[in-house]
Structure formats: structure tokens, C-alpha cells
Amino acid sequence: MTTLRSDRDRNGQKRSSVLQKANVQKWIFLAFAVVPTFGGYLLFALYPNVLSIYYSLLDWNGITKPKFIYFENYVRLFKDHYVWRALGHNLFYMATVPICVILISLVLSYLLTNKGYKGTPVFKVLFFFPNVLSTVVVSLLWAFIYDGSFGLLNAFLKLFGIDMDGFYWLGDTRTALYAVLPPYVWAGVGLYIVIFMNAMTTIPKSLYESAILEGAGHMTRLFRITIPLITPLIRVSAIFLVLGTLKSLDLVLILTRGGPAGSTDVIGLYMFNMAFGEQVQNYGYASAIGMFLFVILVGAKLIVDKLLPDRGYEY
Amino acid sequence: MKERRNFIDLIWWIVLIVWSLTILFPIVWDFYESLKTNPEFFQNVWALPDQLQWANYKKAWLNYHLLNAMLNTLYYVGASLLIGTFLTALNAYALTRIEFKGRKFIWGMIMLSLFLPGINALIPQYILMRDLHLTNSLTGLIVLNCLGESVFFLMLLGGFMRALPRELEESGTIDGASIFKMFIRIIMPLAMPGVVTVAIFKFIGLYNSFLEPFIYLSDSSKYTIGVNIYHANMLMQYTNDWVTLFAGVIITMIPSVLIFMFFQRWIMEGATLGSVKG
């Protein structure tokens, strides 16, 4: 009896020490696998997000001692004419860029999926290409297109007998806002073509065939079959594009730096200039603008969520 | 079902061609202008160059210190890519396949960042980096990129690893392999398609990143290629040497083109992976 029990004990001990060893090993592994990234995430991502709320209540240029001024920055913000002007430009891009991108990519991807024209794979690859280019390259290419003295656009118009006389499209308050739109769309469409094409190929051919039998044309098929079936995807894309457009500032920064005379300024860029610009450095006020943008982003997401139908049709 | 082609088809085909031209033409145009002399360039923007001025490329390479910028970019992109991808894979494995207390909590905290736009964190992040003496340093940027968790990639790799059969670890434990060994020898190779996709997207994102290097790097000797060409463009109003800038833009584009050529399949499939996750 006694020998049996001690035997079992010893066995139990051995097993538990193996388990213990495995357990220690597991925690060492976890320490390597989770602590640096999660710690980094807390420090470099989450903490600054929380901190931005506090910063927005300060009067601070980053050098002198910060002064706590409660909601003064927000009061200033609501009176700041430049903020509202920038917001107007944001709304303009937010309304136009997603619609243009989605419409163009829907039509192009429908053509590529259902028409089977010669060279479809080549088109698909080529259309995607602008998406791998950097914002700097995209911006400079378009700056060259719009340039007054050598720009492609003016040269092209001249072929049709329209002499723009060195008109610089990005340098005029009347045109600059609209001139920033095409690069946005140009650089964004490719990704959505690929996404929509993928979704469209999963739609059963039989649906189209019965539609064709009933004499439906391509437009009917696109709007009656294809688009309703991929609505959930269009919705996700729309949210993605709206938020992305609202947030983006680098394209405008490189193309126009918000000029001329602030006619292309967007909120993100205004915030950026307030914090890192050459003349002023007001981290408190810039943070308040950042928080304002945050609220607008949340609002925009809710609005898009409401506006677009929630679910697509099943097949 | 084959349809007969008609006149409308021709129009649609022309639409596709026109869109292709809007993509190709600006780039091709930039390329052949970069081979002209400045007087030629200003005289007529349509004309092809008389003599190919390859010297413009040499000039861009030297004047804009592109070698230095390329080396900076290589260091910044290379180190962020290797360390960042490895850490993401390690993290994805730990968070999807190892049971431990607090796992759900950590996963939830990370998912929180999906709701944060990040733009309002730009300034506090800058102050933090300044206090840690990580500004004006490529290494600082690497630290920021490797440690600032990227949820999207984590989800992508987590999905890959979750799909691997459970028995892998069990058989590994019986053979007495440590978790580290198991991760390196078994899990990493099996998750390779996901890891490569993540690495490619990280490369594109890092190579193209502008705002972070622009904010954090102040010495021109530390500029990455994108920031470098941006400043070169800023100088144009004084130098007016456009053909050289055109050449610089083409040089900046070459790595993107190469990556796209070699990994085109992966890139286009990876792009749709993201949309499914939504």
C-alpha cells in the first residue's frame, strides 16, 4: 500500500514539474510575444489618444510651461473662421471623392468582369498601379499636369484650340479646390476595382442568364443585379473612403499646402500647420482641432451608416 | 454565354482605354521629359527629346543626394519591416493560439484602436517621441513603427494562425519542442503566405509613408526618399531645373514599380483580403 502511494506521488510530482516547466516556458514566451508590442501599443497609440483630450485644454507652445485654460481652445475654435472654411472643404471632398471613386470603380469593374474584353487582366493590373505609388509621387505627377508654364492639361487644351495662357490650376483660388479632386480619385480607384471585381465574380452566372433571357440590358443588369448584390461591400467601401478622405492631409499638403489663400485648406492640414507649421506652434489649440476632427469622423461614420441600406440581398 | 459585340461595346472599350491612358500617360510623359534639356522642355512639352539626356538622372542622383536618401529609406523600411513583421507574427500567434489569463482583455484593447482615427494623436505622439529623444532619428521612426501595433495586420495573421490545426502544437509538445522552437519551425512556415502578404503591404506602406518622416526628421541628411523629393520640388521655384526633378520622380518610383511587378499577385489578392475583413 505505502509503496504504491509513494510511487503515485513521485509520478505526480514528476508530472507537475514537467507541467511547471511548460508553464514557465509559456510565460517566458508570452513575455516576448506580447509585452513589447502591447506595451508599445499602449505607449505609442493609446496613451497619445487619451493625452490629446488633456492637451486640448492647454495653452501650450511645447516649450514654455503649459497653462490649463479649460475649454478656451474650443471657444476659440468655434469662432475661428478658418476652421469652418476648412471644414467646408472637407465636406466637399467627403461628398465628392467617395462617390466618384465608387461610381468609376463600379462601372470599370463591371466592364472587366462581365464583358470579357481583350486585355482584361492587363487593364486590371494597370488600374491598380496608382495604388502602389506614394502620395508624394502622385502629387508631383499631378502638379506637373496642372502647371501653368509646362503643364499637360494646358498643353492638351491647346490642342483643341483653348489657350489658357499659362493658367496655373492649383494656383488660382477659383480652381484649386476642384483641381485637388482628380488626384484623390485617380489614386483611389484601383483598389476598389479589384475589390468589386472579386465580389462580382462570385455572383452566380445563372442570375445574369435569366435576366438576359428576359431582355435586360447591361445597365439594368448592373443596377438591378450586380449593385444590389454587393451592397454590403459598397457600404464598407463608402465608410472607408469617407473617413479616409476626412482624415487625409498629405495630398493637399504636398499639392498646395492649403493655398492659394487657404482655398484648399482642410481640417487635418490646419491642425498640422497649427502644430508643426513654420510660424505658430500651438499644441493646445491644434489638439482641440484634432478632437473636433475626431468628433466629425464619428459623426460621419454614423451618418453614412444611416444613409446606406444595412443589408444586401441574398442569392 | 458569348454576346455579340456592338457599337456600345466599342464605346465601353474606349472608356477602358482612356482610363488606362490617364494612368500611363502622365508617367510616360514624365519619363520622356526627364530625358530632355530644360530649354527643349519649356519650348514644347509634346515633342520627344532630340538626344536622350541620361545625364539628368546622374544629376538628380547627385544633386538630390538620392544615394543617401535611398540608404536611409533602406534602413528605415528594412528594419521596420523585419522587426515589425516578426513581432506581429509572434503577437498574432500568442493571442490566437495560447490560452492565458487576460488574453481576451488584451485583444479587446487592441481592437479598440479600430475606432480611433489616430489623427488627433499626432501631436501627443510627437511630444512623447520628443521626450524619449526619438525625434530626428531614423531609429526612432523604426521604434515607432515596430511597436505601434497595427491591428489590421494582426487580424490578418491571427486569421491565418487560427486556421492551422490544433494537433500541430500537441504533437510538438509530445516531441518535447519548446514553444519558441515550435513557433519558428512549425507555425511560421505554415503561416508564410500570410506573413509574406503582411510584409509586402508593410513595405509599400513604409516606402510610401510621408507624414511621419516629414514630421520627425529635421536633418536633411536623414531624409527618406519621399521627403527628399518633396524638398527637391520645393526648391524648384529657385532653380527651375525641372527635367532633373522629373528624373528624380522616376527614380523614386522605381522601387514601387519593381515590388509591384514581382508581387503583383500577392498585392492584388491581399487587397481583397482586407475588404473581406472589413
Image (tube, rainbow, N blue to C red):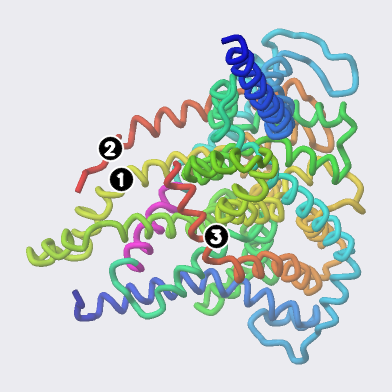
Q: Tell me where residue A222 appears, x and y as whole percent.
A: 25, 58
Residue A35 percent location from the top left of the image? 72, 28
Which residue is tagged 2?
A311
Secondary element type, mark 1 = helix
Numbered label attached to residue A231: 1
**Most foreground residue, A164 or A62:** A62
Percent x, y for residue B142?
A: 79, 43
Q: Amino acid at mark 3?
A: Ile
10 Å crowding of disc 1: few (<14), some (14-19), many (20+): some
Q: Chain of mark 3?
A: B
- Give the magenta-colored segment's residue range: A98-112
Q: Are marks 1 and 2 on the same chain?
A: yes
What SS does tag 2 mark?
Answer: loop
Query: What is the spatial separation of the Cα atoms under label 2 and label 3, in whole angstroms?
Result: 29 Å
Asked whether disc 2 touches disc 3, contact meaning CB atoms under 8 Å apart, the reply is no
Q: Secondary structure at mark 3?
A: helix
Work out which residue is located at the far bottom of the displayed protein and give it.
B50
- Give residue A116's quadrant in the image: bottom left
Q: CA distance from mark 1 to mark 3?
A: 24 Å
Give the class, few, some or many, for how many residues have Cα within 10 Å of label 2's Cα (few <14, many ≥20).
few
Q: CA distance from mark 1 to mark 2?
A: 7 Å
Q: Which mark is residue B267?
A: 3
Mark 1 belongs to chain: A
* Host chain of mark 2: A
- Residue A268 versus residue B205 in the image, above or below: above
Tell whether label 3 touches label 1 (CB within 8 Å): no
